[in-house]
Image: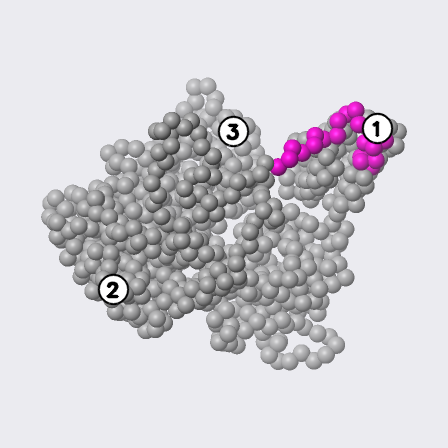
């Protein structure tokens, strides 16, 4: 695709020696904070994924998957920074924070000369008393972060994300050649720099205006064109034309526009002026925010209109036609109709684009209600996937969770859900009708995907497995029986994959574990060569399996192999009665394991795995609990099928109740109020009067029978003692075990002491009992850091304690 600019990732530190020059300071700060942004796909490894390269510079033709790889590396780098210890995070922030000392004008702490090439994003963590290298400052690092004493973890991560976005923009600004693009990058860089200094959200204001910039937008006009020109067609043909239109829109949304200087020769003066404005808007609101999610992102087709489309249509349509012709033989028969109809659709759109009186560009033009309802229904059923080199792997316009601005919070679900007794089950014939409708539509409406490269990754992998293009085998060494030649060759190949993808792991150590008779490896075989695998050691007596290495070779990443490997291992473990997986993951692999269902909240008691599992420095223990009734290799397909049926049921119900009713006239006639159930149409859509639940009894009061209260306390205390996470709190902490414990904890408490107090009749009120239990957990969290096993045990046991108290009516919070 033609050469729009790409955001460039940092590939090496910048060598800068400026100290007091404000203009040169961003370069120095980028040097202080520079780190290799490359990282392999999430499935790359369990310990240390391999590194990738930087994105293409401005004016280059982006290769397939370049944009996806760039986004992935940015997200992985952000996740790595978010997982750094707090001192290293503060050191990173100090480089972009103004000195708080009175009269000092230094805008960022600079690393001392001897440590100038060390990176705070890896192992380097400067002391807070180290002086700034700026000769006009010379204040300590602590002076630059004094204003961050009470900053929350989420706010800190939000600032760090903005800093990474700013550094990527700075590197792009240095490499881009087009002056117009460079000015935009410079403006956004300064905007983010100011937002980091002031700790405010980035808001773009100025002569560019606010989106949308033109009405109607391109999306509305294109869908209006489908109705205006093709409404006379049969329903299947109309659906096909709608797919063609949405394919065009997705191509537009991920199209890299050429710079104004490149287009200057083929545009009139007025068109060139308008294009320069719209190009700047596209960079600021659409292109750059796709890589810098500290900025608000908009879709091109939703914020621009006829003016922009006119200036880019000819070039873009030619490239889309060429793409369709070159890719024709690669996609299935049922999608080739889109290729056949695309030139016709583009010619029709071009004619309406040039017409001054075309109705599709009239803001008052409205398709029929039935057509709009049909489009909404289809939008619910199908998630559109973009096409083209610049869109590969984006997955539509949705932003990924890694690196998302942390001030956004997911709304909590209400705790008081209606009981299953109040919910009517759907009739079987309704569900069967929905399933039949979904099944019939799959051949033509399975997904709005044009090129096979963008289909669902898990479906691709399963299809390859069914065709035996790939195979999964559990292999291992043995000292008691002969090992066939093929197994030995596969083990050697897996050893090379792990060694290449885990460069920080000693090769001798990898060889030792891969060929150890107690370890096995789940191998992913393609063309009789191992391209990935998971090395693991089962502990049947303890009920868990330890994952040692997990890697997929670089050329085969981001294809869904990592997820399918893990699903096969889960099914393999379940078949052998093992219901728990444990692994030590480094900061780059935590995101991958979270996607596979792993958590830092360890549900197994420490004595179960302590002394069995191998521990690694700077790694996080993660746990996955397996459900014996779930077939993990089929789970995603089942969920997708259920989702399709549910959306079909919703659409059917919506069509049944779609009716416009006259408004209420009773209030004009003098009635002050009416019963809710008398509103016309309310019962037809499924509304039912809600019976207010009976007022629950108040928690046991302090005047309750002391013996009954003591019995309840004894029951709760016994249950808490038997919980799997209670082991750190069963007895008092001794000074021999933890010498400085009583220097920090002035009022210690433990479950044994609470039992003794209960026997002596100390707990006359539930407040005393709850206070002692709360002191156990608060002491633990005060003394231990959040990433320790003790801290997690305190959180888990506290939740369990509150649940038991609620069951007995002893909790009123």
Looking at the figure, which quarter contains the N terminus? bottom left
Q: Nearer the viewer, residue 413 or 568?
A: 413
The residue positioned 39% from the left and 62% from the top of the image is: 447
User: Residue 810: x and y, percent?
Assistant: 73, 33
x%, y% of residue 324? Answer: 28, 66
Seen from the viewer's position, the closer of residues 662 and 317 is: 662
* Residue 373 in the image, given as x and y percentages of width and height: 34, 52
Disc 3 secondary structure class: helix
Query: Residue at position x 59%, y 76% from top?
Result: 489
Residue 713 is a magenta residue: yes
For the view shown, which residue lies furthest in the right direction? 760
- Return the residue at label 3: 148
Answer with left or right where residue 810 lies relative to residue 162: right
- Asked if one can make out residue 619 in the rendered structure from this viewpoint, the answer is no
- Residue receiving disc 2: 233
Identify the magenta region. Answer: 693-714
Give the distance between the C-alpha atoms of the residues marked 2 and 1, in whole angstroms.
Answer: 80 Å
Residue 747 inside the magenta-drawn segment: no
Pointer 1 residue: 706
Front of the two marks 3 and 2: 2
Q: Residue furthest front?
A: 669
Front residue of this view, candidates 100 and 191? 191
Q: What is the crowding at mark 3: few (fewer than 14 residues within 10 Å), some, or many (at least 20)?
A: some
Mark 1 or 3, nearer chain start: 3
Q: Tag count in the figure?
A: 3
The foreground one among 426 and 671 is: 671
Q: Is residue 160 left or right of residue 219?
A: right
Neighbours of disc 1 within 10 Å: few (<14), some (14-19), many (20+): some
Q: Nearer the viewer, mark 2 or mark 1?
A: 2
Q: Is residue 158 above or below residue 326?
A: above
């Amino acid at each position: 695709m033609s050469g729009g600019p790409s955001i460039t990732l940092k590939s090496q530190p910048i060598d800068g020696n400026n100290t007091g020059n404000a203009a040169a300071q961003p370069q120095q700060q980028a040097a202080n904070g520079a780190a290799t942004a490359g990282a392999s796909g999430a499935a790359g490894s369990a310990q240390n994924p391999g590194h990738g390269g930087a994105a293409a510079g401005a004016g280059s033709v982006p290769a397939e998957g370049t944009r996806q790889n760039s986004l992935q590396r940015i997200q992985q780098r952000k996740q790595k920074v978010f997982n750094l210890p707090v001192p290293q995070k503060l050191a990173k922030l100090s480089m972009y924070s103004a000195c708080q000392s009175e009269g000092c004008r230094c805008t960022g702490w600079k690393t001392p000369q001897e440590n100038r090439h060390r990176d705070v994003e890896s192992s380097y963590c400067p002391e807070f008393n180290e002086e700034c290298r700026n000769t006009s400052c010379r204040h300590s690092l602590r002076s630059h972060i004094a204003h961050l004493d009470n900053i929350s973890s989420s706010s800190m991560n939000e600032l760090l994300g903005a800093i990474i976005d700013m550094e990527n923009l700075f590197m792009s600004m240095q490499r881009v050649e087009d002056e117009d693009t460079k000015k935009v990058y410079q403006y956004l860089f300064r905007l983010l720099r100011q937002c980091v200094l002031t700790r405010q959200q980035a808001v773009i204001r100025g002569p560019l205006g606010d989106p949308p910039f033109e009405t109607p937008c391109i999306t509305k006009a294109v869908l209006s064109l489908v109705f205006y020109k093709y409404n006379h067609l049969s329903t299947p043909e109309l659906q096909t034309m709608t797919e063609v239109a949405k394919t065009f829109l997705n191509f537009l949304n991920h199209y890299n526009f050429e710079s104004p200087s490149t287009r200057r020769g083929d545009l009139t003066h007025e068109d060139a002026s308008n294009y320069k404005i719209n190009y700047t808007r596209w960079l600021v609101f659409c292109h750059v925010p796709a890589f810098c999610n500290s900025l608000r992102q908009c879709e091109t087709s939703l914020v621009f209109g006829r003016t922009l489309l006119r200036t880019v249509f000819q070039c873009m349509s030619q490239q889309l036609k060429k793409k369709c012709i070159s890719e024709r033989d690669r996609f299935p028969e049922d999608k080739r109709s889109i290729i056949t109809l695309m030139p016709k659709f583009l010619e029709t759109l071009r004619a309406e684009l040039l017409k001054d009186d075309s109705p599709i560009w009239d803001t008052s033009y409205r398709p029929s209600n039935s057509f709009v309802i049909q489009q909404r229904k289809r939008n619910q059923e199908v998630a559109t996937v973009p096409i083209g080199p610049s869109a590969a792997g984006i997955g539509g316009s949705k932003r990924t969770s890694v690196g998302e601005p942390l001030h956004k919070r997911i709304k909590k679900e209400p705790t008081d859900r209606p009981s299953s007794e109040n919910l009517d089950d759907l009739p079987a014939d309704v569900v069967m009708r929905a399933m039949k409708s979904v099944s019939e539509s799959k051949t033509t409406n399975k997904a709005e995907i044009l090129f096979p490269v963008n289909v669902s990754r898990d479906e691709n992998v399963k299809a390859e497995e069914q065709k035996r293009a790939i195979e999964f085998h559990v292999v291992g060494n043995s000292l008691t029986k002969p090992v066939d030649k093929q197994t030995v060759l596969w083990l050697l190949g897996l050893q090379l994959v792990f060694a290449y993808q885990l460069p920080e792991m000693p090769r001798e150590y990898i060889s030792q574990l891969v060929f150890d008779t107690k370890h096995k490896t789940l191998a992913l075989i393609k063309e009789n060569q191992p391209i990935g695998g998971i090395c693991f050691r089962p502990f049947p007596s303890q009920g868990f399996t330890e994952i040692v290495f997990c890697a997929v070779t670089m050329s085969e990443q981001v294809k869904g192999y990592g997820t399918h490997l893990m699903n096969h291992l889960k099914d393999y473990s379940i078949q052998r009665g093992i219901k728990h997986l444990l692994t030590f993951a480094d900061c780059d692999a935590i995101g991958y394991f979270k996607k596979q269902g792993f958590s830092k909240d360890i549900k197994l008691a420490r004595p179960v795995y302590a002394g069995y599992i191998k521990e690694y420095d700077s790694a996080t223990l993660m746990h996955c609990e397996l459900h014996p009734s779930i077939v993990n290799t089929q789970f995603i397909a089942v969920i997708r099928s259920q989702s399709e049926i549910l959306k079909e049921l919703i659409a059917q119900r919506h069509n049944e109740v779609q009716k416009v009713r006259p408004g209420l006239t009773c209030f004009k006639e003098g009635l002050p109020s009416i019963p809710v159930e008398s509103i016309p149409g309310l019962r037809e859509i499924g509304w039912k009067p809600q019976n207010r639940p009976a007022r629950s009894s108040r928690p046991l009061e302090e005047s309750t029978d002391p013996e009954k209260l003591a019995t309840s306390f004894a029951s709760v205390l016994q249950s808490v003692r038997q919980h799997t996470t209670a082991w750190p709190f069963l007895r008092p902490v001794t000074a021999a075990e933890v010498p400085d414990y009583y220097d920090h904890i002035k009022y210690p408490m433990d479950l044994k002491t609470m039992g003794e107090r209960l026997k002596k009749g100390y707990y006359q009120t539930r407040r005393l009992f709850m206070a002692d239990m709360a002191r156990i957990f608060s002491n633990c969290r005060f003394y231990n850091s959040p990433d320790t096993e003790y801290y997690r045990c305190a959180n888990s046991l506290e939740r369990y304690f509150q649940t038991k108290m609620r069951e007995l009516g002893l909790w009123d919070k």
